[in-house]
Image: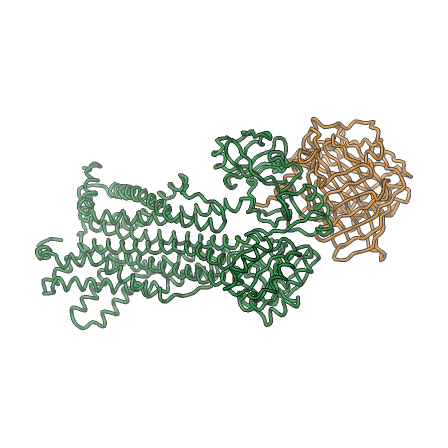
């Protein structure tokens, strides 16, 4: 005899009809987990593509530029004159062009002379020859967005008054509204024949045979790629941490699903046993259960994706605003997600659900038909499970330690984090069991003995909810420490970096001298610092060489991570250089190492006398004395300056400099305002992280509540005898509350070191592997206290409802326990 | 993505066409020629016009090699090469619309080291090019330029990350035509180039290598060749010798290697400015010793003989590792020889 599908499902699903609250919590748990994961993913994807877009706009050509000192263009012959003198320059022409009602920014390049690593994603690696850009009809490279905006197809050649554009060709990574084409075509279309806008300067100085001013009479100013690169690097690092965080949140969600599904299965044991006894084959029953779970996963997954979308969309304006501030680039204010995002989210929800339910399904599979459907049978299983779990936990923790000692690379870092987290979570029930046993030893009165013993008995049902709480708490501690460290480090670094009150950059050395002279005579001015920037190839990578004056204020605030004795005197004497942490790590350079800096006039040797923090900067940096810099780079004008001034007079000084020397906004910066601006941007990013953190804790609270609610039902047979022995319902309820708070308190104590270990892995391993610099880890004990209180509150809140129900339970229900067979 | 690397590869691929995908010859020199001028026997050469470029032909080169020594008797060699390639046969050479691509190779060799560099440029802007009179050929800062109206004397200079040279080249003889009056046959299928040389320069100047600058003197040899398809499809590469047998006699020999079948040998005997094509079968070039260079086996030592002219030589390199690790890598360096004659020369080997 076999049961047809419909009655089978009706029997299985009737459980949820009777317990809609439990169904809701299962779905909510799963949906929240998916929402956290997909929301973080959406945010990151959007932000990252925005960075990329911003970074590839013309302003993002990552090479030093030579610009005409006056006017927007210079004659093309300057390019040839400098090339003939051996300078590795490449011409660029830019302008805007109205094409079919759309304004395009046109960037004309010469792909043959363009230096390497300029950050323009011009050609897909598997594409045809870049010479295709200028051979035959040539190509116009545009992004998909631009193509859509033009309403054109690939291969079209839109016509403008000056002629036809080269055929449009897709190049996905280009910024919106940017058209890259050969310089010849760009000059023709922009009406700029024989003119160029700028020269990109490569870093190979080995063929220079004449100084720049001897090679051409064109007055040029050198402009370095924007220093915002620093901020982009920091932001990338933050994104990586957000990704890790999204993953952790999802893990927390899976523990919730696991505990909810486990409890639901336990409660359905009589139904399952009856169905098996009625002749439903085990295979069929398991299939039905999997199908049921998959249905839930899809429903909850979709809801979670929608929730994640809403969540990301709510936070995006902040992220977009941050990006606008960081890059001055336009970021689309709305989310654009492709179908793969949805598919990936659903898949992860489905796989997650099945993984989280695997153990419950296995139990159903092995359940003997005739075993009494009693909790004891379940618990026998549970004890064996606990042993295995502890073994697995210890193995995972050992693996984490091993990875920490021997592993290298980003993936090893992530694997270590995963092993650490899961291992610690699996170990929690054992730790709690030990704690409860120790508690029982202190007990003298029977009521206290029961209190501890019953706690142990309850442990199996609660362990997954408690694991979720543990993970949520430790993720909170970890991410909190990381974000806090980020903030502390970044803000103090910002203070050091932007310590001078005024920054200015003269168009040439003569003007710089004039301004310096004038400033020296001003009463509010304390110190004027000059700085020269040049780009070289050091150890086969583009590296900045910065010449700095030795000034009291720099000495006082320079962010050294390590330094030898008298670093500044030796820097001024020209025997020592300071290098950035990234360069030191990348090249394995330590204090006292000898380095050779390739200048325009030859190689210069220095001893590394200091290593300084340069957070976020993807490029290595070498600092040398200003006099040395002038010798090594005689053609690089030293025009950048900062001024230490009386803060009260800064605004007036800036205003007067602007009027007197006609310095445009980009060349004269009130650093106090810049600092406030940068700080505001980062605060916003930190707020986003804070919001994510709170949400994770809320999810863990939901898990605890669901577990307790479902457990309350099954615990009646244990509580009823106590009531019958004379313990009042109110007292029982208070004891329930107390026990839960005790369990949460122990869990929170375990969560603290776990969270700190997590933070350490994030900043000392993952960040170093990904970005080459180590974030100093700061601790925030006040946050721990708050979080501890929060954990207890979460436990209290989750226990409140079941305890209240118990306190107000009709005595008849307690009596009924004795009448029931179960 | 390394734009430059791809560019380097792609432009070189475009310049010398695709890398030897089986039957394409070394550096794609064996590809078809439709639309370009054809190389036929009986061309009349005229100077100084023919020192300048011939854009109607697909490829062309200005190729200088020099064997040098300093006052202490230390030997050196150098190479200065400018390649031109038309990417399309339409003859455009104005501004950015130019269809011409230029490539420069420069190298300096000592017994201990071999340093080289490579450059690319588009035609039409003046970044690279050549003019017949007063003569100049250049790419970026590398140049070979007549000091005055006359072709000689010339200034020759180039520099890279670990070498530099600046020389004055002087000659008082006219160029000599290679092959059959400048028609140089490269295979039995008729592939050919126009080819003339300036074999008898005296050279003097400075050469920097291994971190030291040397005052050097010696001889230089200039090859000029233009063609639209110099190699047959199944020719993998060549071995080329320029040997100064005495003050009066220079010997140019080459072997074009066929993937299958017999190799193609040819050469010219240049005596007192008179160039004579050596008859078929008169040239013998046999590898004597192979050396591992840049991960491959290259015949760096040779036995060279021209029995009709009583020439039997053993040729050895100054530096067996004279490898040009450029977009299309090849071996090029100074050699010396002993036997029936003794002296110095240059050896180029491609397609290994």
Instruction: Tell me residue A93's x, y (percent).
Output: 61, 41
Q: Nearer the viewer, residue A58 or A817?
A: A58
What residue do we see at 70% from left, 31% from top?
Answer: B92
Vertical comparison of A278 with B192: above or below: below
The spot of residue A669 in percent (x, y) is 54, 56
B189 to A308, vertically: above or below: above
In the picture, measured across the screen, residue A464 lies left or right of residue A246, that is left
Which of the 4 quarters of the picture holds residue A169? Answer: top right
Left-right relation of A532 to A498: right
Q: What's the colour of chain B in the image?
A: orange
Residue B92 visible to the viewer: yes
Q: Is residue A206 above or below residue A294?
A: below
Q: Can residue A543 be seen by looking at this rendering?
A: no
Image x and y of residue A710, in percent: 21, 53
Q: Nearer the viewer, residue A772 or B129?
A: B129
- Dividing the picture into quadrants, the one containing residue A337 is top left
Image coordinates of residue A357 in percent, x first then y, are 29, 49
Between B254 and B312, the one nearer to me in the picture: B254
Tell me what hue chain A is rendered in. Answer: green
In the displayed structure image, the side of residue B286 where residue A323 appears, left or right: left
Q: Disc count in the image? A: 0
Q: Quadrant of the N terminus of chain A?
A: top left
């Amino acid at each position: 005899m076999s049961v047809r599908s419909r009655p089978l499902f009706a029997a299985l699903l009737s459980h949820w009809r009777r317990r809609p609250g439990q169904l809701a919590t299962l779905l909510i748990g799963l949906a929240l987990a998916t929402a956290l994961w997909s929301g973080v993913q959406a945010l990151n994807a959007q932000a990252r593509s925005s960075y990329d877009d911003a970074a590839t706009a013309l302003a993002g050509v990552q090479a030093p530029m030579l610009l005409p000192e006056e006017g927007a263009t210079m004659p093309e012959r300057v390019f040839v004159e400098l090339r003939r003198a051996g300078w590795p320059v490449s011409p660029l022409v830019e302008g805007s062009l109205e094409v079919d009602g759309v304004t395009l920014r046109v960037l004309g390049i010469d792909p043959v002379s363009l230096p390497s690593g300029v950050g323009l994603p011009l050609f897909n690696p598997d594409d045809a020859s870049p010479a295709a850009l200028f051979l035959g009809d040539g190509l116009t490279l545009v992004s998909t967005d631009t193509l859509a905006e033009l309403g054109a197809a690939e291969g079209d050649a839109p016509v403008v008054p000056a002629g036809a554009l080269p055929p449009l060709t897709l190049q996905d990574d280009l910024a919106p509204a940017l058209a890259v084409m050969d310089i010849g075509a760009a000059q023709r279309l922009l009406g700029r024949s024989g003119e160029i806008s700028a020269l990109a300067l490569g870093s190979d100085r080995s063929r220079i045979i004449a100084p720049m001013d001897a090679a051409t009479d064109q007055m040029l100013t050198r402009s370095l790629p924007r220093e915002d690169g620093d901020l982009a690097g920091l932001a990338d690092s933050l994104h990586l941490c957000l990704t890790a965080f999204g993953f952790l949140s999802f893990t927390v969600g899976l523990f919730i699903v696991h505990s909810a599904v486990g409890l639901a299965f336990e409660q359905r044991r009589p139904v399952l046993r009856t169905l098996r006894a009625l002749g439903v084959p085990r295979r069929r029953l398991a299939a039905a259960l999997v199908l049921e779970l998959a249905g839930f996963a899809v429903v909850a997954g979709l809801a979670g994706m929608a929730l994640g979308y809403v969540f990301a969309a709510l936070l995006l304006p902040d992220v977009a605003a941050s990006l606008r501030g960081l890059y001055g680039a336009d970021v689309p204010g709305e989310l654009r997600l492709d179908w793969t995002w949805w598919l990936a989210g659903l898949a992860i929800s489905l796989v997650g659900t099945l993984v989280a339910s695997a153990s419950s399904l296995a139990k159903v599979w092995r359940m003997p038909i005739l075993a009494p459907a009693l909790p004891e049978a379940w618990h026998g299983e549970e004890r064996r499970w606990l042993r295995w779990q502890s073994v697995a936990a210890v193995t995972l923790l050992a693996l984490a330690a091993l990875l920490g000692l021997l592993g290298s690379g980003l993936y090893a870092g992530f694997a270590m984090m995963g092993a650490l987290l899961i291992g610690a979570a699996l170990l929690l029930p054992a730790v709690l069991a030990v704690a409860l046993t120790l508690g029982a030893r202190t007990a003298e009165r029977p009521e206290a003995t029961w209190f501890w013993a019953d706690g142990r008995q309850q442990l199996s049902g609660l362990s997954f909810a408690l694991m979720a709480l543990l993970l949520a708490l430790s993720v909170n501690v970890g991410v909190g420490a990381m974000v806090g460290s980020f903030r502390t480090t970044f803000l103090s670094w910002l203070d050091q970096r932007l310590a001078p009150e005024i920054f200015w950059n003269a168009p040439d050395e003569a003007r710089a001298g004039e301004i310096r002279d004038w400033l020296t005579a001003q009463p509010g001015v304390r110190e004027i610092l000059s700085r020269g920037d040049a780009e070289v190839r050091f150890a086969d990578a583009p590296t900045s060489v910065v010449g700095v004056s030795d000034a009291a204020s720099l000495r006082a605030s320079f962010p050294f991570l390590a330094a030898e004795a008298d670093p500044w005197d030796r820097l001024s004497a020209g025997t020592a250089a300071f290098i950035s942490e990234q360069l030191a790590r990348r090249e394995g350079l330590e204090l006292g190492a000898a380095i050779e800096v390739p200048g325009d006039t030859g190689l210069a040797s220095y001893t590394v006398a200091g290593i300084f923090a340069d957070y976020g900067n993807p490029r290595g940096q070498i600092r040398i004395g200003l006099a040395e810099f002038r010798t090594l780079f005689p053609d690089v004008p030293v025009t950048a300056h900062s001024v230490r001034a009386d803060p009260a007079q800064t605004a007036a000084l800036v205003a007067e400099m602007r009027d007197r020397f006609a310095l445009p906004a980009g060349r004269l910066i009130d650093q106090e305002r810049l600092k406030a601006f940068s700080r505001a941007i980062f605060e916003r990013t930190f707020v986003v992280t804070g919001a994510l953190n709170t949400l994770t804790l809320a999810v863990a609270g939901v898990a605890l509540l669901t577990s307790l609610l479902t457990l309350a039902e099954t615990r009646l047979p244990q509580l009823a005898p106590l009531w019958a022995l004379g313990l009042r319902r109110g007292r029982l309820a208070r004891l329930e509350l107390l026990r839960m708070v005790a369990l949460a308190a122990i869990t929170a104590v375990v969560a603290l070191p776990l969270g700190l270990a997590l933070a350490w892995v994030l900043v000392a391993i993952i960040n170093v592997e990904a970005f080459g610099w180590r974030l100093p880890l700061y601790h925030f004990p006040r946050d721990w206290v708050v979080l501890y209180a929060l954990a207890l509150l979460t436990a209290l809140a989750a226990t409140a409802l079941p305890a209240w129900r118990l306190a107000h339970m009709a005595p008849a229900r307690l009596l009924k326990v004795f009448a029931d067979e179960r | 993505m390394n734009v430059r690397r791809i560019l380097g590869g792609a432009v070189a691929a475009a310049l010398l066409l695709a890398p030897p995908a089986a039957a394409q010859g070394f550096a794609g020199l064996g590809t078809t020629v439709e639309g370009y001028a054809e190389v036929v026997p009986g061309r009349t050469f005229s100077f100084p016009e023919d020192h300048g470029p011939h854009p109607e032909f697909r490829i062309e080169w200005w190729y200088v090699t020099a064997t040098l020594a300093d006052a202490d008797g230390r030997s050196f060699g150098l190479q200065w090469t400018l390649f031109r390639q038309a990417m399309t046969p339409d003859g455009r050479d104005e501004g950015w619309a130019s269809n011409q691509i230029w490539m420069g190779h420069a190298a300096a060799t000592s017994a201990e080291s071999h340093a080289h560099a490579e450059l690319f440029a588009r035609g039409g802007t003046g970044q690279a090019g050549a003019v017949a009179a007063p003569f100049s050929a250049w790419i970026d800062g590398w140049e070979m330029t007549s000091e005055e109206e006359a072709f000689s004397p010339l200034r020759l200079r180039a520099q890279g990350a670990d070498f530099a040279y600046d020389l004055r080249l002087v000659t008082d003889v006219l160029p000599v035509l290679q092959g059959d009056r400048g028609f140089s046959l490269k295979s039995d299928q008729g592939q050919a180039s126009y080819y003339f040389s300036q074999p008898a320069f005296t050279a003097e100047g400075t050469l920097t290598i291994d971190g030291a600058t040397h005052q050097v003197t010696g001889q230089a040899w200039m090859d000029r060749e233009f063609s639209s398809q110099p190699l047959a499809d199944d020719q993998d590469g060549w071995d080329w010798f320029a040997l100064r047998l005495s003050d009066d006699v220079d010997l140019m020999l080459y072997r074009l290697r066929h993937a299958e079948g017999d190799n193609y040998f040819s050469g010219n005997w240049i005596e007192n400015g008179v160039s004579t094509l050596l008859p078929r079968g008169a040239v013998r070039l046999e590898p004597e010793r192979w050396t591992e260079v840049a991960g491959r086996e290259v015949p760096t030592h040779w036995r060279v003989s021209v029995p009709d002219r009583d020439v039997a030589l053993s040729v050895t390199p100054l530096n067996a590792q004279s490898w040009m690790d450029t977009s299309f890598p090849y071996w090029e360096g100074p050699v010396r020889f002993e036997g029936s004659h003794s002296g110095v020369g240059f050896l180029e080997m491609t397609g290994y």
